[in-house]
Image (tube, rainbow, N blue to C red):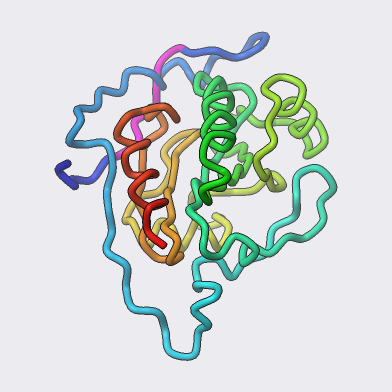
């Protein structure tokens, strides 16, 4: 697969409950060829003095969505992580089902999906944490870890997303951008919003990373 950069281009149309499709009306016109699905960034050497048990990229704490209790990302060290900025009222919101299916399929082999709700794009995540948690559970049966509503783009982006942007040279341009982090906590792949969770190229990279022990 050619490793050219992929940039998330907002899409047109799409699903959301109720009204308010403005903001998603330009999100599904994204055209991607197989050789522009992901960008792979070589892993840099670990900084001196940093424990290999938890790479710097994971040395962050975020509140859990359901109860707002602080959680360390170091608990996921050594696993393959799919980090996704989510929204409840977007054309891509249906991807929740595919993300949960991925988590269910590969969890035993070491894949963890991490959801970060954000209102950054089109104001499509207006609710509070409890409303988001209820929506995810009741509508899509989401069981993968979700964290409190946060900012993922711009100068106010949370520290994890700032590091992911620096590592890949890409920032989310819309909801459901995907960063795939290897077991080493350093190798990162970036996939645009229109890449569905069941996309063959995404699955291929996930399985390759899971095979690394």
Q: Is residue 91 left or right of residue 210?
A: right
Total numbered badges shown on the rendered structure: 0
The residue that appears at 17% across and 41% down in the rendered structure is: 1
Q: Is residue 116 left or right of residue 40?
A: right
Depth check, front residue: 136 or 158: 136
Span shown in magenta: 7-13
Residue 26, quarter of the rendered image: top left
Magenta span dominant secondary structure:
loop
The residue that appears at 49% across and 78% down in the rendered structure is: 52
Residue 37, quarter of the rendered image: top left
Would you place residue 170 above or below residue 85 in this image?
below
Depth check, front residue: 31 or 112: 112
Q: Quarter holding the C terminus?
A: bottom left
The residue that appears at 46% across and 34% down in the rendered structure is: 174
Is 12 a magenta residue? yes
| Residue 155 at x, y percent in the picture | 51, 57
Would you place residue 41 above or below residue 92 in this image?
below
Is 154 a magenta residue? no
Q: Residue furthest bottom?
A: 49
Q: Residue furthest left?
A: 2
The residue that appears at 45% across and 38% down in the rendered structure is: 177
Depth check, front residue: 66 or 117: 66
Would you place residue 181 above or below residue 14 in this image?
below
Q: Residue furthest top?
A: 18
| Residue 184 at x, y percent in the picture | 43, 66
| Residue 134 at x, y percent in the picture | 79, 28
| Residue 183 at x, y percent in the picture | 45, 61
Would you place residue 84 above or below residue 20 in this image?
below
């Amino acid at each position: 697969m050619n490793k050219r950069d992929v940039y998330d281009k907002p899409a047109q149309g799409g699903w959301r409950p109720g009204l308010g499709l403005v903001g998603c009306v330009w999100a599904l016109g994204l055209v991607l060829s197989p050789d522009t699905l992901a960008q792979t960034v070589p892993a840099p050497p670990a900084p001196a003095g940093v424990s290999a048990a938890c790479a710097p990229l994971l040395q962050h704490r975020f509140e859990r969505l359901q109860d707002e209790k602080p959680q360390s990302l170091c608990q996921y060290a050594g696993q393959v992580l799919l980090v996704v900025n989510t929204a409840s009222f977007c054309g891509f919101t249906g991807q929740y089902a595919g993300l949960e299916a991925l988590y269910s399929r590969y969890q035993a082999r070491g894949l963890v999906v991490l959801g970060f709700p954000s209102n950054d794009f089109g104001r499509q995540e207006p609710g509070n944490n409890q409303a988001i948690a209820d929506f995810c559970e009741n509508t899509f049966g989401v069981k993968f870890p979700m964290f409190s509503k946060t900012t993922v783009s711009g100068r106010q982006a949370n520290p994890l997303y700032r590091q992911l942007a620096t590592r890949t040279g890409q920032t989310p341009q819309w909801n459901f951008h995907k960063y795939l982090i290897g077991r080493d906590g350093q190798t990162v792949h970036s996939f645009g919003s229109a890449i569905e969770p069941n996309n063959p190229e995404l699955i291929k990279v996930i399985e390759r990373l899971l095979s690394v022990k």
